[in-house]
Amino acid sequence: MTAEIIDGKAFAADLRARVAEHVPAFVKASGRKPGLAVVLVGDDPASQVYVGSKGKATVAAGMESFEHILPASTPQDDLNALIARLNADDSVDGILVQLPLPDGLDEAAAVAAIDPAKDVDGLTDANVARLANNEVGLVPCTPFGCMMLLNDRLGELAGLDAVVVGRSQLVGRPMAQLLINANCTVTVAHSRTRNLPAIVHNADIVVAAVGRAEMVKGDWLKPGAVVIDVGINRLAPTEKGKKGQLVGDVAFGEADHVKAITPVPGGVGPMTIAVLLRNTLVAAHARAG
Ligand code: GUN
């Protein structure tokens, strides 16, 4: 059996195109474009790349992109004051504060300052509670993108055993909630979990989101499992290559026996931005009433 490679890049391109198709109707009804503000504090190169791609994708979808780049030395009060201005700005429908923030800044305080109606990352307490209660709200982009890929590949998820490896606020926890809401039987594994290989081997669905290169081994995976790899890890550069290779949290080369698996790159990564655009359009419509 040969694993199907889930083409997240193509799925994301399709989702972006569908979002872009719906933008003109919003513009016609409201007289303005949906707007997404991205706040980047500091000069982390990976975050700069992400923020640049978000801005380009936003404009390509026919939306307004507002980028706020602040020095790493920005005081908390200034960051919160910017978020307050964006909350009050009618041309802004979505606010994303790129994480992680530099040392010395309080991420929880920055997130708490975001108006939940503009919280396109789904990280505020109000949106976390809505997800926990299976109510309509804004859902974190990466896990929502993973759910779209799972639904597309598997259809009905009810009754399936799912293991989420990782318990972060951005991915692991909301992913587990989404799978519970889809009536899966969910196990959340983390750094203190005992006998991880056996737990993973029980799963019909494996979502790996730990940020450790190729940690999930091929022989942990049940034949027929569907594997979603959220990790993006750069290996140390070899003598030949200038840059190290990008790999996921799953040993992709050992996973030929599974039903389907997302590659890294080109799997989950492109879905995050596509869902961000979708969330921005959803927030714009909700705000416009
Ligand atoms: N850093 C890496 N991924 C994300 C994301 O989805 N949202 C935010 N705010 N920061 C991130």
Image: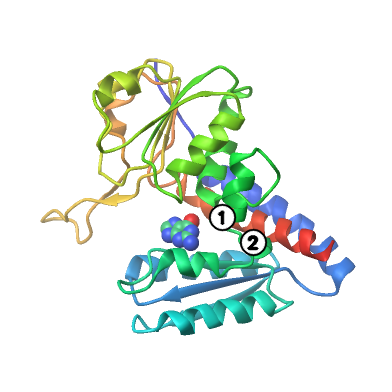
Residue at image position (39%, 67%) is: 47
Nearest-to-viewer mark from 2 and 1: 1
The numbered dot on residue 111 is none
Q: Give, as a three-letter code, the residue at label 1.
A: Asp
* Quadrant position of the N terminus in the picture: top left
**Residue sticking out furthest to the left:** 239
- The residue labelled by disc 1 is 125
Relative to 63, 287 lies left or right: right
Residue 287 location (% of width, % of height) = 78, 64
Q: Residues within 10 Å of mark 2 (few under 14, many from 20)?
A: many
Which type of secondary structure does the marked residue at label 2 adopt?
helix
Residue 14 location (% of width, % of height) = 64, 47
- The residue labelled by disc 2 is 116
115 in relation to 244, above or below: below
Q: Is mark 2 within 8 Å of ligand 1?
A: no
**Residue sticking out furthest to the right:** 29
Whether pointer 2 and pointer 1 mark residues with C-beta atoms closer than 8 Å, the reply is yes
Q: How many marks?
A: 2
Q: Give, as a three-letter code, the residue at label 2.
A: Pro
Measured Cα–Cα span from mark 2 to mark 1? 8 Å
Residue 205 location (% of width, % of height) = 46, 25
Residue at image position (61%, 28%) is: 182
Asked which colour scheme the image uses, the reply is: rainbow
219 in relation to 43, above or below: above
Which picture quadrant has residue 213?
top left
* Quadrant position of the C terminus in the picture: bottom right
